[in-house]
Amino acid sequence: MAPLEQRGHRAYPGAAGNGFPQTLNLEEERMNRTRWILLTVVVIAITAFFALDLGRFLDFDTLKAAQGDIEAFRDARPVLASALFFTLYIVVTALSLPGATILTLAGGGVFGLGWGLLLISFASSIGATLAFLIVRFIAREPVQRRYGDKLRAINRGIEREGAFYLFALRLVPLFPFFLINIVMALTPIRAWTFYWVSQVGMLAGTAVYVNAGTQLGQLEGPEGILSPTLILSFALLGIFPLVARRVLEWLRRRRMYRGWERPRRFDRNLVVIGAGAAGLVSSYIAATVNAKVTLIERHRMGGDCLNTGCVPSKALIRTARLLEDIRHARDYGVESAQADFDFGKAMERVQRVIAQIAPHDSRERYEGLGVEVLEGDARLVSPWSVEITGADGTTRTLTTRSIVLATGAAPFVPPIPGLQEAGFLTSDTVWDLRECPRRLVVLGGGPIGCELSQTFQRLGAQVIQVERGLRLLPREDPEFSQMLMQRFAEEGVELRLGSEARRVEVDEDGKRLLVEGPDGEEAIPFDEVLVCVGRMARLQGMGLETLGIRTDRTIDVNEFMQATYPNIYACGDAAGPYQFTHVAAHTAWFASVNALFGMFRRFRVDYSVIPWSTFTDPEIARVGLSEEEAKAKGIRYEVTTYAIDDLDRAIADGEARGQVKVLTPPGKDRILGVTIAGNHAGDLIAEFVLAMKAGLGLNRILGTIHIYPTMAEANKYAAGEWKKAHKPERVLRWLQRFHAWRRG
């Protein structure tokens, strides 16, 4: 293999002296320069206000003393007086200067309730919006870039219900309005929404102060305006939008369920459709809390993972790995080793492995846990009713408070002319083979395609892998794709990158796949073609269209895993966005808990720390951001790498290849993302997953004792590389002098 990037550290973007290219384009530089100019102007204006003691003109006593002169100016030049007051009010609120309360009183005292309220209502909203826009322009992008992962839940809440929250805050004048302007500017709320909600929300409080200003001569100070009764009234007003939101949700649900008759009693608390990873977890949770739950499966318990996915593929990968080890026996001092390999028996072993694991997902086990398991086709006939059709054609209907759709996904087969006629394999049907194809074409360069390409090449097939993109595993960083492609080339897998499958031809000479590649059209002869170009959620035949449940490539769900109807949930591959067994189990927890206890508390699904692994050789595992994703999102980061060819255990095992790559914010040990390539990468990544979930940084990993010699030490050494790049040089120079002094 080509030499890997050696362990080390680099900063992005543009750390001085590291040779890494500066990626901020000219437009971004101009934007940053404008931000600094605007910030400087605002700071100078606020500094001048306090340095020149301009606040003395916005003092309550000063206002009362000057009331006569101001009213005389108003009588002489009413339009100019109104315009000057309007402009002054906007400037004060836009710069968040103290004095808005005094100006509001002055507006009432000088212009009266009607005209004063009109001027102040618009001036305050415009000024607040200007303050909002100033803060947004200066600070939102840097704040979101730095703390976006921590603000994700807040951002989603503001996008969904920001107007309600803002309205509630605006109704309570005791809450500092300038803080509302600043905080809201850092969120995704639209500027127009901020303006009109502020205009309406501040009206009640503004009216109180303007009206008080009409009695300016009788007031001893602005604090005399708010009596305890008035404070309570404002507090109740602040609660009103939250109550209104609940009422609107109730009305929305009522309108959504219009036309459907809700049962007076329910047969079940929960009905789960699909007995794959997501469905099993959902029904398990329901049974654990003693809910009455029915699980419906039309095919096999365990779903794709057990029967056609994770389990059989890993069993076959193990056989292929053994054969590869035997081929390299001389590297371990074994002069003579050979294998009398039987492909059919290897596939029979796959079925034995499935059978051995199947009891974990079996009907008997789940019925023992208290789950009613039914076999048949399920169809939604109302938001609370599921019709089950058995194998003998009999039907029964169950009513239920909530439904969880966990119907999984199936391989996507592209409409390539001639493919259906020639016949093809997918990750669902490849396990029926009992003879290894002599020539195998694999369509697709994602994880499934890569795992099966390498496996079948090691089992004796001549594999040609066709991928539309220019590299394998396009979701990973390029160096990891290159690592895998280099290994494939060494093992004999032929790659056709940047190639599009056009059609399949069959004649007396056999089968051919015609692809359009960088060098034109090529005909690839094959015995079998394995289609691995992605998977699509199973959405047909369940009555989703009848109920009007929204779908695209998956079932549309919100952050609580609710589908179109609030009592219908979807999880796992049926809902996306990640098609992994462990993510299916993760989303199933949220779906089932919200379905059973959502009337008390609902939980938003958390996708912040999602790991995955491609089980090729080398394994490639990732959690969090890749470097390409960080660049695309404009996130500043540093890269720390550790080459596993330096690791003692890897050298001893003859597995000295791979890399640990960690992304962190500049100067901080917080982990943004990790990619590991190497033996047992899928196991090694777990330490970083825990660290990210628990908010632990690289310093904590470095301070954790790792057994020697193990592969897990690679994680510690990667943390050590980060530490070396951030060692306190000044302190070390002083220590050098100290020790020299100690030596005399």
Image (cartoon, grey):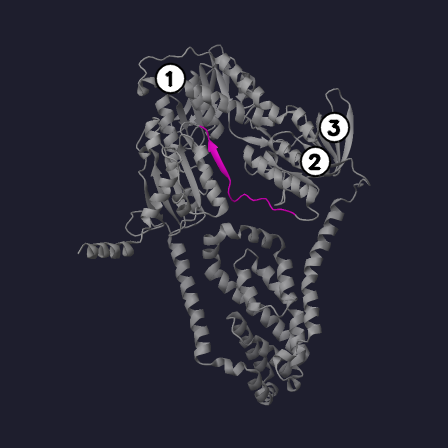
Query: Amino acid under label 1?
Result: Ile
Q: What residue range appears in magenta?
A: 602-615
How far apart, in angstroms, are the residues tagged by discs 1 and 2? Answer: 54 Å
Give coordinates of residue 28: x percent, y percent. Answer: 40, 55
Among the two numbered marks 3 and 2 on one chain, the one whose residue lies closer to the N terminus: 3
Residue at (59% x, 64% y) in the render: 195
- Between circles 1 and 2, the one closer to the viewer is 1
The vertical placement of 707 against 36, above or below, is above
Name the residue furthest left: 744
Give coordinates of residue 51: x percent, y percent. Answer: 43, 78
Q: In the displayed structure, does residue 147 sit left or right of residue 732?
A: right
Residue at (50% x, 15% y) in the render: 506
Crowding near pointer 2: few (<14 within 10 Å), some, many (20+)?
few
Dividing the picture into quadrants, the one containing residue 31 is: bottom left
| Residue 227 seen from this side | yes
For label 1, the residue is 326
* Quadrant into which the N terminus falls: top left
Residue at (45% x, 56% y) in the render: 142
| Residue 656 seen from this side | no
For label 2, the residue is 545
Disc 3 is placed on an element classified as strand
Give coordinates of residue 278: x percent, y percent. Answer: 61, 34
Q: Let me know if residue 500 is in the magenta part.
A: no
Query: Amino acid under label 2?
Result: Glu
Q: Nearer the viewer, residue 106 or 587?
A: 587
How far apart, in angstroms, are the residues tagged by discs 3 and 2? Answer: 17 Å
Query: Amino acid under label 3?
Result: Ile
Q: Let me know if residue 609 is in the magenta part.
A: yes
Would you say the residues marked 1 and 3 are in contact, meaning their CB atoms lie under 8 Å apart? no
Disc 2 is placed on an element classified as helix
For label 3, the residue is 388
